[in-house]
Amino acid sequence: MLKKILKAAMLTVCTAAMIGILSTDAEAKPKNLSKEVKVGDKVYFGTYEQDGKENNGKEKLIWQVLDKNGDKILIMTEKIIDVQPYHVSDGIYEAITWEKSDIRKWLNEDFMNAAFSSSEKNKIQSTKVVNKDGKYGTDGGKDTNDRVCLLSIDEAQKYFKSDDDRKAKVTEYYKQKLRWDLIDKMGYSDKITDHKISIIEKLMDNYDSYWLRSRGFSWSGAAAVYDDGSVSEFVHRVYDDYFGVCPALWVKL
């Protein structure tokens, strides 16, 4: 009887170990850019501060491959890499389209220069970005030509088949930046209580919300993906500065 129990226990341990090995293999490591890369793969491209420790340099950016057209692929960062307002406006109800937004400028200038070397920039393609009107009648503005952009509502629903697939984790750098922004809003003091910190930490789970470029329900807002992966067009004012950024771009292999 004891032998049977030990044999069963050993079988359970071996099975669990085998499942762990299979799970590890299933979590394929990101690849370097090559023509063998396919949709669904993860690739390295560029660098950006992610671990919140600026003294050790920037970390490699990991992107998920969403689409492929010949020798070009559409990629979006695997994680939310920064927190930015869609637009900083003098008037809180100013109507802003993607074409005129601060976040478009930030992506194609600040982020581009911070994340990519000259040789990497040469691989990033300038692409026509279609900006449809919102389904509630909000003006989408003119189509643009961009090297870096955000996904639209249609693209977020096309390339991710479920809310769970659409969810995005955050980097430690994002958490730290958002933490101090929130502390500033709550009123900074030399004695930040543990209670205040605990409130802030609860607002920052492993997953968070990120902007889409599409117009939202309101003419002064933009769409976003929530931390549960659902797409929403409501209540996101362009000056809200607690939404994350997941850049997207076409790159030549």
Image: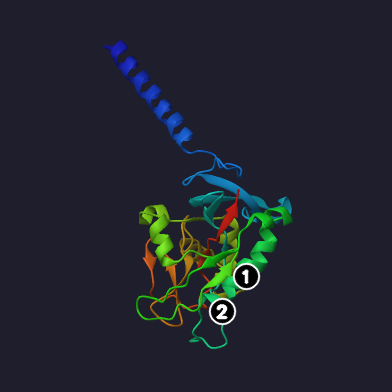
Q: Quadrant of residue 231?
A: bottom left
Residue occupied by mark 2: 100
Three-letter residue code for mark 2 = Lys
Residue 217: x and y in percent read: 38, 78
- How are the colours assigned in the image? rainbow
Looking at the image, the residue that sits furthest to the front is 70
Q: Earlier in the sequence, mark 1 or mark 2?
A: 2
Q: Secondary structure at mark 1?
A: helix
Image coordinates for residue 205, horizontal then vertical, percent: 46, 57
Position above or below: 8 against 21: above
Question: What mark, if any, has residue 40 been given in the picture?
Answer: none
> Which of the 4 image quadrants contains residue 118?
bottom right
| Residue at which label 1 appears | 106
Residue farthest to the bottom, as pictured:
91
**Residue 109 appears at what percent x and percent y?**
66, 68
Please name the amino acid that badge 1 sits on.
Trp
Task: Tell me the crowding category of disc 2: few under 14, some 14 to 19, or many 20 or more residues within 10 angstroms, Cα based.
Answer: some
Residue 47, position as x, y percentages in the image: 66, 53
- Quadrant including the N terminus: top left
Q: Is residue 124 left or right of residue 202?
A: right
Residue closest to the eye, 8 or 103 = 103
Q: Is residue 130 above or below residue 9?
A: below
Q: Is residue 229 visible?
A: no
Image quadrant in which you'd find residue 233: bottom left
Q: What element does badge 2 sit on?
A: helix
Instruction: Please name whichever residue, 177 or 169, is drawn nearer the observer in this view of the structure.
Output: 169
The CA span between labels 1 and 2 is: 11 Å
Q: Residue at x 45, y 36 (%)?
A: 26
